[in-house]
Image: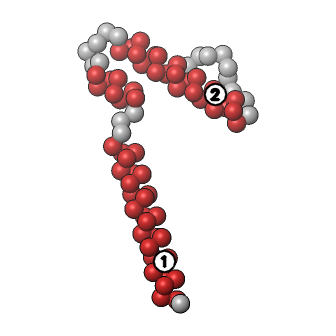
Amino acid sequence: GNKSKNKLLRLHQNKKLLHSKETIHKTKKQPMEWEKIFANHMSDKGLISKICKELRQLNTQKTKVQLKTGQKGCLSGSV
């Protein structure tokens, strides 16, 4: 009856809470790609070119998403 429904509801809520905490933990744990580049190449002269390359890739990904969703965006390729 009601006891079993309450148990199922609590179980579902607990699973949902644990899943959301896992997601937050994973998000905090993984550094962004540009952070990895910066950490690995702090004194490297190629740092600027690597940052520019990453920005171009991000801009390309954004443009692809805009095209898929039908949004209008700047397609000139400037960052």
Amino acid residing under circle 1: Leu
- The quarter of the picture where residue 20 lies is bottom left
Amino acid residing under circle 2: Lys
Callout 1: 10 Å neighbours few (<14), some, many (20+)? few
How far apart are the alpha carbons under marks 1 and 2? Answer: 42 Å
Question: Measured from the top left, where is residue 34 in percent x and y?
Answer: 39, 27
Asked whether the beta carbons under mark 1 and mark 2 sit within 8 Å of each other, the answer is no
Callout 2: 10 Å neighbours few (<14), some, many (20+)? some
Instruction: Check the image and report above or below for 22 versus 36.
Output: below
Instruction: Check the image and report above or below for 66 versus 57.
Output: below
> Dot 2 lies on which element?
helix
* 8 vs 39, nearest the viewer: 8
Residue ID at (48%, 70%): 12
Position of the C terminus by quadrant = top right
- The quarter of the picture where residue 51 lies is top left
**Residue behind mark 1:** 8
Residue at the far left in the pictured view = 43
Residue ID at (43%, 58%): 19
Residue ID at (64%, 27%): 64
> Dot 1 lies on which element?
helix
Residue ID at (35%, 23%): 37
Q: Earlier in the sequence, mark 1 or mark 2?
A: 1
* 4 vs 79, nearest the viewer: 4
Instruction: Identify the mark at residue 19; answer none if there is no mark.
Output: none
Instruction: Check the image and report above or below for 51 versus 5.
Output: above
Instruction: Identify the mark at residue 64; answer none if there is no mark.
Output: 2
Question: Measured from the top left, where is residue 1 in percent x and y?
Answer: 53, 90
* Left or right: 21, with 59 as reference point: left
Foreground label between 1 and 2: 1
